[in-house]
Structure formats: C-alpha cells, structure tokens
Image: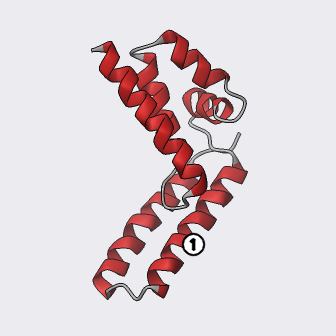
Amino acid sequence: MQFIWAALGLVCVGLGLIGIVLPILPTVPFMLLAAFLFARSSERLHNWLLSHPTFGPPIVDWQMRGAINPRVKRVATLSIAAVFGISLALGLKLWLLALQAAILSAVLTFIWTRPNF
C-alpha cells in the first residue's frame, strides 16, 4: 500500500510542477496532497518535499497554521481571473460561465479567508 501512496504523491508533484506553467492547474493544492501522501508512504520523500526551498515553506505554513502567503493569494486571484477571462473570450455558454463563476468564487473565498503568515 505504501508504494501506491508514494506513486500517487509523485503524480501530485508532477501535476504541481505542470501547474507552475499552466494557470488552470493549481500548484499548491497538489503539493499539499503530495505531502499528505508522502507522510503515509515515505519519510524520505516527505522530508524532501518539506525541505524543498520553494515548495516546503507553503506546505509547512499550511500544516502549522492553515496559513497562505499573501503573495500566493494574489497570484491565485490573478490566475483565477485569467482563467475566467479566457472563458469569457471563448464565448462559453452562459450556464457554464455561471457555474465556473460560482466555483471560482468559492475557491477565492476559501483562499482569502485563510490567515496570512
């Protein structure tokens, strides 16, 4: 079972890395999920992720305080706005835009109600 957890953690790291360049794919949630999966499968991978200079600090902040860096909040907001703007530019159907707006608004509400560190 540990092999499956570790494999899923590596998939999440891969998706998180892809999310660095694709605004539609979030990086931090995948890294948080990877940390969760690594904690159940591989102490070495878990420690590697937590000590990573880029990905480690947001994960530790989340685990310790449920906090999100204000800069990350701004980047997430801009990314969400860009994705919605692309949807508008593509002329998606109104019901799909409304659904997307509701979901993205819920995500933004969650992000902005988390404490800063």
Q: Is residue 97 above or below residue 7?
A: below
**For this rendering, which residue is in front, 73 or 25?**
25
* Residue 27 seen anywhere in this rendered image of the structure: no
Going 31% across and 78% down the picture, which residue do you hit? 96
**Does residue 1 sit above or below 79 in this rendering?**
above
Residue at 63 percent of width and 44 percent of height = 68
Mark 1, other Cα within 10 Å: few <14 / some 14–19 / many ≥20: some
- For the point 71% across and 39% down, the residue is 117
Q: Which residue shows up at 56% across the image and 36% down it?
A: 66
Tell which of 83 and 115 is nearer to you: 83
Counting from the top left corner in percent of width and height, residue 11 is at 41, 35
Q: Amino acid at mark 1?
A: Ala
- Could you tell me residue 7's position as x and y percent? 37, 25
Q: Would residue 86 be seen by someone viewing this image from the given angle?
A: yes
Q: Quadrant of residue 60?
A: top right
* Residue 38 image-quadrant placement: top left
Q: How many marks?
A: 1
Residue 16: image x %, image y %? 52, 43
Query: From this viewpoint, which residue is outermost toward the top?
Result: 43
Q: Which residue is mark 1?
A: 82
Seen in the picture, residue 27 relative to 94 is either above or below; the reply is above
Q: What is the secondary structure assignment of the residue under circle 1?
A: helix
Percent position (x, y) of residue 80?
54, 66
